[in-house]
Image (spheres, rainbow, N blue to C red):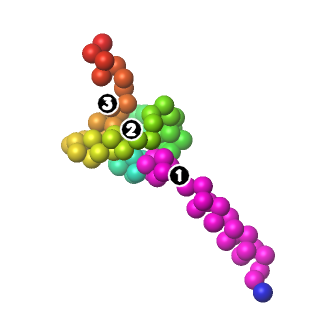
């Protein structure tokens, strides 16, 4: 017979795996690639929540395009934030 605590830990792990989403995986990927060049002293700590707020209006299919474009560029973080700024694309 298993201990109750081990059963609860298994159930918690199963719920956590079930909650992982496609968008969440992309967020983790962006965070992993941006964090090495992020200046935390200047801009503050970069967290998944902060990054999610920045890309909340971007559809998931466009995030795949953003990922590909950033991977092809020389500076991942710089390209990521440039692509998120709509003023850069409208010619204003």
Could you say where residue 48 lies in the image, as x and y percent from the top left?
A: 50, 45
For mark 3, give the secondary structure. Answer: helix
Which of the two discs, 3 and 2, sits closer to the camera?
2
What residue is pinned by disc 1?
21
Viewed as shown, does residue 50 lie left or right of 36? right
Residue 19 visible here? yes
Q: Which residues are magenta?
A: 2-28
Q: Residue at x 37, y 30 (%)?
A: 84
Cα separation between marks 1 and 3: 25 Å
Among the 4 quarters of the image, the one containing residue 90: top left
Q: Residue at x 69, y 68 (%)?
A: 11
Q: Nearer the viewer, residue 82 or 90?
A: 90
Q: Residue at x 60, y 55 (%)?
A: 19
What residue is pinned by disc 3?
82
Could you say where residue 33 lies in the image, as x and y percent from the top left?
A: 35, 49
What label sits on residue 62 in the rendered view?
Answer: 2
Which of the two discs, 1 and 3, sits closer to the camera?
1
């Amino acid at each position: 017979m298993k201990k109750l605590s081990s059963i609860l830990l298994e159930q918690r792990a199963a719920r956590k795996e079930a909650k992982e989403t496609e968008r969440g995986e992309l967020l983790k990927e962006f965070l992993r690639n941006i964090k090495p060049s992020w200046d935390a002293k200047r801009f503050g700590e970069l967290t998944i929540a902060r990054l999610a707020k920045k890309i909340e209006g971007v559809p998931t299919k466009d995030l795949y395009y953003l990922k590909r474009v950033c991977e092809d560029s020389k500076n991942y973080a710089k390209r990521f934030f440039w692509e998120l700024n709509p003023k850069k694309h409208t010619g204003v």
